[in-house]
Every structure is written in structure tokens, then in C-alpha cells.
Amino acid sequence: MNSVFPEDPKLPHPERSILTIYTGPEHYSFSLYDPEETGSYVYRKLIVKNRSDAFSGFKEFFFDRAFLSLPFRKVWIMNRTTNFTFVPDSIYKDEYKADFNHFLFSDNQGEIMTDFVSSAGIAILYQLPEAVSRFMLRSFSKPELIHYSKPLITYFLKSSENVNSRRMVINLQENGLDIFCFSRNAFLMGNYFLCKNISEALYYILFAWKQLQMNQLDDCLHILGNAGYREELIDRLALYLQQIRFPEISPEIYFSGIETDRIPFELKALAVCES
């Protein structure tokens, strides 16, 4: 399948394939795979001339590629927005939703979206530009909109079922990092922190570790993603923490035989957890 995406619109089995559009403020990317075909997973990052207007670049690409309108088995729209928060779904009830939304997003910078993570018992609230949500809902057949943190939380909760120690997951991004923490099969906290250098990253990680009173000998730190200071960060963290891990998703049939290093972990987790 690698040879037919995205250049050749003649996909062999679009009715079996799963398309994911990964939106972001500065870039968009795509993944496509057939869960029944070995090594079919393909990932492409869209290169745009103006990173401050990546959405316009995506729309141009969409109208130039007829294959994006094929009747896929499923279409995911995964949204990377750092303006998000978690609310226990036990208290996020209809009669209180308007109050929560007004309090958390008084700046009104986009449409308020809700994504539930049933295994964690939480609702993810985030803002998505209205132009983006309307275009996606109009352009694809029954797309499912999802926040990027959902597959990460779902994956690590699922893999925590037989783990006794607590875990902190660091997802390094271009201009910041995500921190997600778990205790066995419970989700403790999650947040995004804006940072551009190793000093800021170290501060946020070690401060969160201390606040949660995690054990430096037994509890695990998992590092995902890439940043220019990644290797130095690992060396510095090793001075304080004993259990540092670099998780990788075991090859599913569609990952078999392909390089997955440059595919964002949340995309791979989505494929494993939601196919």
C-alpha cells in the first residue's frame, strides 16, 4: 500500500482502510492503513509554505487529492490543541456543562469539543477552531473527532492492568511536553506544558514527580516523542530516577516490517486501541 498513498488515488480496498487526519496549529499529517493487510500502515506529514496557516495548506491538499473522499471504513480527525482540560465524567452532567464550558473557556477561541475516555472516567474538554471542525464534518463521511490525549491515556491505562508501580509518561513535542500519570489502572493527572529548552522540561517533569510523591527507585518514567534536547534530557533525568523506559508498540499486522520511529506515538496508539 505504500506505493499508492498519497500520490496514487487508486487504493485497493478503501472500504477496509482507516484514514486519520492529524490536525495541529502549525502542521497536518495523515495516516492510512488496512487492518487486514500486513505492513499497510502509511504516515505522511504535510509540508506547508506558511506554518501559521496550516489549515489553508490542508484544504488545498484535500481538493487536489480525490482519494481523500473515498468511502473509508473509518475516518478519524485527531486534534492537537494544547487548550484542554480533564473533568470527571461523574460530574460533567448536562445541567452543569454550560457552567463548566463558560468557566474553562471564557476566551471563546473556538468550538468546545468533548471527548470521553471511559476507561479513565473522564471527559476531555478542548477548543477547536470552528472553521476546522465544520470543514472536517462537511468533507468526510461520518468522521469521528478525537483529542490527541485520548489514545495515549487509553493505551497506557490498558497496559497498566498488571503493573503495580506508578508511571509518568512524558510526550516530547516541538514546543512543549505532555505529562500523563497513572497508578495501576487509574489515571492520576495530565497536562501540557509550554517549554523550549531542557531546563524548563526538567523543571516540569521533576516538579510533577515530587508533587505526586512518586518513588524514584520503583516508579517508572516513560519517554515518548522527539525534541532537540531529548538525549541530554534523558541523561539528566537518569541522575534522579532509576526506572526510565522508552515504550514502543508491538508490531500489529499493519505495522509489520515498516519503520515506525517517526510516527507520533498517539497515532500508533489510536491504531492499536481504536481499530
Image (spheres, grey):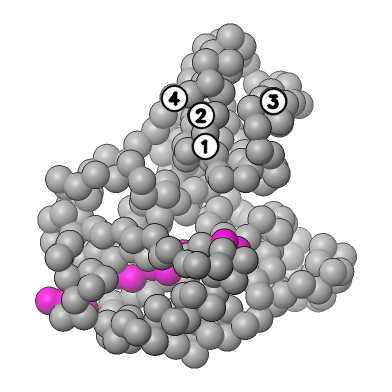
Residue at mark 2 to residue at mark 3: CA–CA distance: 12 Å
Mark 4 near mark 3, Cβ–Cβ under 8 Å?
A: no
Type of residue at label 2?
Answer: Arg
Residue at mark 4 to residue at mark 3: CA–CA distance: 21 Å
Q: Percent from the top left, x then y, of residue 262?
A: 36, 46
Residue at mark 1 to residue at mark 4: CA–CA distance: 16 Å
Q: Percent from the top left, x then y, of residue 144?
A: 47, 75
Whether residue 89 appears in this view of the structure is no
* Residue placed under numbered mark 1 in the picture: 227
Q: Quadrant of the N terminus?
A: bottom left
Side (left or right) of 102 relative to 199: right
Q: Closer to the N terminus: mark 4 or mark 3?
A: 3
Type of residue at label 1?
Answer: Ala
Q: Closer to the N terminus: mark 1 or mark 4?
A: 1
* Residue placed under numbered mark 4 in the picture: 245
The answer to which image quadrant residue 21 occupies is: bottom left
Side (left or right) of 26 relative to 245: right
Q: Which residues are magenta?
A: 11-26
- Figure check: 177 above or below 246: below
Type of residue at label 4?
Answer: Arg
